[in-house]
Amino acid sequence: MAGTEFLLEVRCEEIPARMLQPAIREMATRLFEDLMALNVAPAEMETGFTPRRLILMLKGLPTRESDRDEEMIGPPVRAAFDGEGRPTRAAEGFARKCGVEIDALRRVETDKGEYLAATRKVVGRPVSEVLAQLIPRIVEGLSWAKTMRWGVGEGPWVRPIHGVVALCDGEVVPCRVFDVEASDETLGHPVLSPRPFAIRSVSDYRRKMARRQIIMRFEDRRERLQDQLGEAAESLGGELVADPELLDRLTAICEIPGSVVGRFEPAFLSLPREVLITSLRDHQSAFTLESGGMLLPNFITVMDRPDDPEGRVQAGNEWVVAARLEDARFFFNEDRKTSLEQRRETLDHLTFHAKLGSYADKTDRIAELAKEICESMGWREEVEEAVAASNLLKVDLTSEMVKEFTSLQGIVGGLYAEREEYPVAVWQAIYDQYLPASTDDTIPRGRVGQATALADRIDTLVGMFGLGLIPSGSRDPFGLRRAGQGVVRIVLEGDLPLDLDLIAAKSVLLFGDLLERSGQEVLSDLRLFLQDRVRHLLSLRGYAYDTIEAALAAGSSNLPDLLARVDAVHRVREEPEFLSVVLAAKRISNILREASDEDFEEARLKEPAEQDLHKKAEALRNDIDRAETRGDYEQCLRDIAKLSEPLDRFFVEVLVMDENRQLRNNRIALLQAIQRMVSRTARLTEVVVDKAEHRDRGESTSPS
Amino acid sequence: MEVHNVQSFQELILRLQTFWAERGCVVQQPYDLEVGAGTMHPDTFLRVLGPEPWNVAYVQPSRRPADARYGENPFRLGKHYQLQVVLKPSPKDVQAVYIDSLRALGVDLEVHDLRFEEDNWEAPTLGAWGVGWQVMLDGMEITQFTYFQQAGGIELEPISAEITYGLERITMFLGLSRSVYDIDWVPGGVSYGLVRHQDEVEFSKYYFEVADVEFLKIQFDGHEAEAGRCLEAGLVLPAYECTLKCSHLFNVMDARGAVSVTERVALIKRVRTLAVACAREYVVSREKLGFPLLPEGEASLPGDKGESDGRD
């Protein structure tokens, strides 16, 4: 390819796996943007990284910046020439600086008077000079999650830097990153190919890295590993327990991707599957294998070398895995010596929050609240199991297993409860209690699980809000946003027509005098907080924000009901009659803004248009009510849309603000009744019709 | 270079001490108090403060009462041994030198998998943190490698590199032993179990069943007060010893299950307050002495001669 090529390799001590991707992305973006701003963007850019290097390879760079003219302003004219019109030193100096003769200087008028001016020809710099200036700033300025200093105080950077290769068409770009001078020399793998070698070009670099078996592109390494893992699994007659996150993590910890298969004693397979998988994943960064749903007594992990010539890597990993699984078995056996019921006492000494009591206190509240939820859902049969699950819900927090593998909280309790032969609904409720933890998760299976998971989260939210610990900005130490998200998802996806306000109010009562804020404040803050989670969730499902706002403004306590209303608005909002009622509602809202409640008397209706509006509205009232009661909100909105014609006519033919006070107040009362009638499914004024309307909306109403 | 594999606990210690002695380290001895880690030895915690260069290596028996297992667990110990190396300022080639130290143990890196995995270190009781890795050999953590960033609440400059070898683990791993008690202390002779098993059993019983919590609390209060008196008298090293006493007493109380969550936070804070005060006073005391370890003529500048400081 034509143009100049550039190779940058920053070589350093091992960068944490989780920081590599963001770093290379930032480095590439910043260099590309800076080059583009100077009109010397490359035609192609490729990136690579290993734990020890960040690599950029640019092709098709212009060889130099283009020349350009620069307008220069010099000294004021009165200072540029002496009494006899001869140029002063100032004028001469300015001409010299611009590289022109005195005669070529021009005069320009400015706010401050007349000045000398000139056009200076700026010769574009070679691109290597541009790079020499950009590279140190970009590399040193990368943003890291955590930085350090080293030596006599070098840095800050993520880890000490050892070498910088910066080559422009084979020439070293002279620059310095911290105390490291750029050169054409790098090292291979620190153990397997530690000798320095020189690089001549991008293709030379590729060749020499390949010869050392170093794969610099993340995607290539991952593919290589995936193949190796797949083959290994197949040869063992099983398949990998999929874990894309683990594969990414392992791809980021090696530059020469190799995999190693190991065995463990089949006796360890008596440990719960979840424990085995977690232990191998968290402690040994190893994949587990399964066949027909059963785990195999094997694992596969990744090493930073191509092979295992003497089997030492396998032997070492097997040794560690055996020790780890031995530990897990020890924890499991220790835990099982105490039944969950006996273990409940330990919750007395486990603080949930200094001001909100122990986990034993929390357990009592969860049980009460879960019971309340079941009752208000009409789940009579589930009450007993929900209380049983609540009582044991947090017991595993004091188990050795959860102390060792915090990510297994809940799951461990569930597994123990299963082994103690609690009813399926009970152990599953314990097992599922932290679901959904991420967007991919499902909600707890079954009613008992949903009731207890909700009770737990609402208890946490109300408690923390009651102490004023409301998340703000990026600060959310108690994970309350996730708890809120969980509540909303369980209620929506479980289709639970639960009155959340009522449940939260009950929760406030259960805290007695522990809360530091009034119940009113807590409930209203919590309502707004949950509304935010609802907004987020529904916008992910593709509903327009104003559709969501309109439905929210008409009530958000019952979320499945809210969802039905959002969906109804979504379906009808493009229809002309509906939009026309929306516009009318906005107009009514403007008119009513200053109005107080007025009494209505049918006899006072004077104009045919207002009589007509009243009549049609009354005729529709029953239909609207019935549709609403049925929960058929789409029909409800369609019925409302039928008012578009009489409303339009009303606004054309009737002046609401009549001079006659009686007439005026009666019309206001009519409109108030109409507005109430059309606003129950959704507050129509929230629906944005066009930009002009949008402004109007901003002024007239805001979500309550 | 053909180096035969280390076969025993004491050989490992001797090899590592020799290796680091040859690279200019002061070979120090264990601190003669109960400490939780080699980091708490004043030759690490205090020496990393201020501008003076410092290179040291020593074994430190490290007590972790909560990890005691009555001598029954093959991997966990209430007391284990660390070999601690501090290089200040951290030399540019510290990682390569560390890798060489593994070769000196007879680890043939041509057939092993060596990786540096992110592992940042933080000691709330010392107001200290650092950035670094756990060094993994064939999937086994054999060393903690840390660039100290802060100690006693003080930002450090120059930066020290701390290398902490877990001696039992490395010996076990090199011989692929199934139990720590089976490893040879002496090559082909006395085992680790014969040297230490009784110690583990008795101290487990003491930490978990016998220790008198009231007495521990009284001692904690007493040592805390004594630390304060020492600081007032300008005696930073005795004050630091009292701080270490408090730290260990806290660990014993904790293992005894005598510390509630709120007490825990409060006790850690009390130890930390002392450690921070000691750190501050230590820097003052060294300054008064004119930073004796600084090379001639650099008495007021941070030293950067660490690498040439008697190293080969």
Image (cartoon, coloured by chain):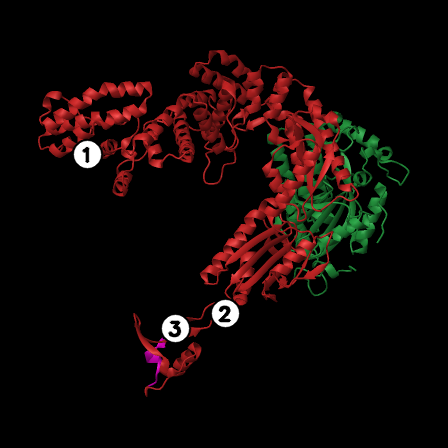
Colour representing chain B: green
Chain under label 2? A
Colour representing chain A: red
| Quadrant location of the C terminus of chain A in the rendered image | top left
Amino acid beneath label 2: Arg
Left/right of residue A334 with respect to residue A81 in the rendered view? right
Give the CA separation, mark 1 to mark 2. 66 Å
Q: Which mark is residue A591?
A: 1
Q: Residue at x 61, y 34 (%)?
A: A242
**Going from the N terminus, do you reach mark 1 or mark 2 first?**
2
In the image, residue A512 lies at what x, y percent? 46, 21
Give the CA separation, mark 1 to mark 3. 60 Å
Mark 2 lies on residue: A125
Residue A415 position by quadrant: top right
In the image, residue B97 lies at what x, y percent? 75, 54
Mark 3 lies on residue: A72
Asked if residue A311 is positioned above or below residue A4 in the image, the reply reads above
Residue at the far right in the pictured view: B189
Element at label 1 = helix
Asked if residue A141 is positioned above or below residue A324 in the image, the reply reads below
Residue A341 position by quadrant: top right
Q: Are marks 1 and 3 in contact (CB under 8 Å)?
A: no
Element at label 3 = strand
Task: Specify the segment rendered in magenta.
Answer: A75-82
> Can the viewer see residue A264?
yes
Residue at the far top in the pictured view: A381
Q: Nearer the viewer, residue A307 or A436?
A: A307
Chain under label 3? A
Chain under label 1? A
- Asked if the magenta segment contains residue A36, the reply would be no
**Going from the N terminus, do you reach mark 2 or mark 3 first?**
3
Left/right of residue B26 with respect to residue A653 in the rendered view? right
